[in-house]
Amino acid sequence: MTEHDSSPDSTDSAPPWRADVLAAILTVCCALPGVILMWDFTVDDSLIAPRYAHHLVQGVGYRFSAADGVTDGVTPLGWAHVLVPFARGGVLSAWMAAKWIGAASWLAGVALLGVAIRRVSDSNRKWLALVLLALCTPTAAWSVAGMETGVVLGMAAAAMALRVLRPSWSVPCAALVAAWRPEALPWALVIAATPGRDEHLDGWQRARRMGLTLLPSASLGLLRWLVFGQFQPLSLLAKQPDFTLGYRYAVACFLLTGPIALLAFRGLPTWVRALQLSVLVHLAAMAMAGGDWMPLSRLMVIALPGCMLAAAHIFASGGPVWAGLRLTVSAAGLLFVAWRVGPRAAKVGTTRLALVDAAREKLRGRCAVGTVDAGWVGAATASRIVDFAGVTDPAVAAMSGGHTSKQVPRGLLDARAVDTVILLLAKDARVATPWFESRFRRYTEAYLAPRLGAMGFAAHSLRSGALHYLVATRTVACPLQAKEQMR
């Protein structure tokens, strides 16, 4: 039995529907400050889907560059189509809409999670889980990053809430999360195979739910095969798994897992243990996938709503001293991330937009631009983009190496008529003489620089905040007509 406090819960003393509304409002109020503070967070890849959406509006088709073929450059197939109604104003217009859609989706999921937390227990200590929500910089940041992650986060929060409210409904929500984020499939299968609160499953029910969970992912895989000739997203092909990096990534993400860090297990009901199991399975899946290069634990955030829900039950089921100790342990990792990464991450958007503005004139009329950072560069010019990370380019994706470590050959530059290459200097590095002997931040750029120098490329600086790029250019005969510059 769950221990009760002598003090009544103010939300539980109201009529059930009113208590649910108050719980939803309270939970949203805890999440909203983080969303506001991290509104300016983004990553380069968030501008890829908006460029696809802009080309769809223009009638060019599902292409990252108008001069190239149809490519599978958006891992959540269908996300670019969601942004089409907002893409008439250009790439940045669609990107801004994506931020609003992500924030709204996350807050809607949070509201439902608040209702579930209210029903977990009669103890007031369950609301300590909202401290974890308020401190969780990764969920706040990724809800407004401009990627599909905000929508996926909202669906993941809804799936967790439904484990308490309507367990059978949590399965399709988790299945949709896995369809857009392939690494989440093991997590979703755990949700499907384990019972929710006050639920009992037999073997047939488990098998049927797991089959339902696989259906959206399999359907998207089949669609990809029919359109692009391969079942897996192009981004998976472009990045070869590194299990050492994946293990380190999973260990770092472990700091964010509230109920796992609480080390509570004895006496927990099956549905809470299932939430803990889903987090552990997701950590293993991320390690197998090789982790991720993006900041603030992007791959981990879909499992964090489940952590918060499990924490609500754990806080409520013990005494006040244990609740305080467990809260301290589980909040420590979140506080560390908020202090160490949060302030810098909250300024990324301003820096990226300044880069886009500064690069527009420099890239005007260029034939083809090669870069590892295809997102912001694609927002700055309508010219062909040669994506050295391989996220949007099947030819580059097939090369060995990860997103930032591919040895791009000269033949590719010549075949694509690349007359401009954008390279990121190492932190605090200065431009050397000659320029191609400068220190560069990523392997691909360090590999290319001396070869570009031998090809007669000249370079000049492009700076924004702490980011210092070199724009290397050469004069070549361009067979392509660059379209009107995107706004």
Image: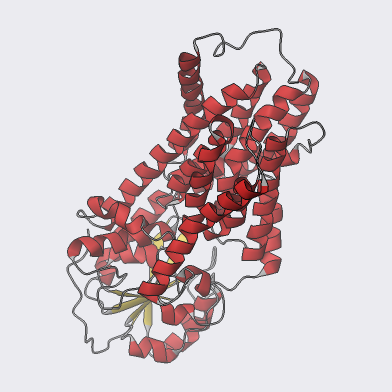
**Nearer the observer, 5 or 358:** 5
Q: Quadrant of residue 121?
A: top right
- Give the answer, above or below, for where 299 lies relative to 195: below
| Point 46% across, 31% down: residue | 32
Residue 289: x %, y % from top left:
62, 64
Horizontal side, residue 212 vs residue 350: left or right: right
- Give the answer, above or below, for where 425 lies relative to 125: below
Q: Quadrant of residue 323?
A: top right
| Point 32% across, 69% down: residue | 64
**Nearer the observer, 64 or 4:** 4
- Give the answer, above or below, for where 320 lies relative to 207: above
Name of the residue lying farthest toward the right: 266
Residue 346: x %, y % from top left:
48, 44
Horizontal side, residue 423 vs residue 5: left or right: left
- Give the answer, above or below, for where 466 lies relative to 174: below
Residue 348: x %, y % from top left:
45, 51
Quarter in which the N terminus is drawn: top right
**Nearer the observer, 356 or 385:** 385
Whether residue 56 appears in this view of the structure is yes
Colour setup of the view: secondary structure
Q: How many marks?
A: 0
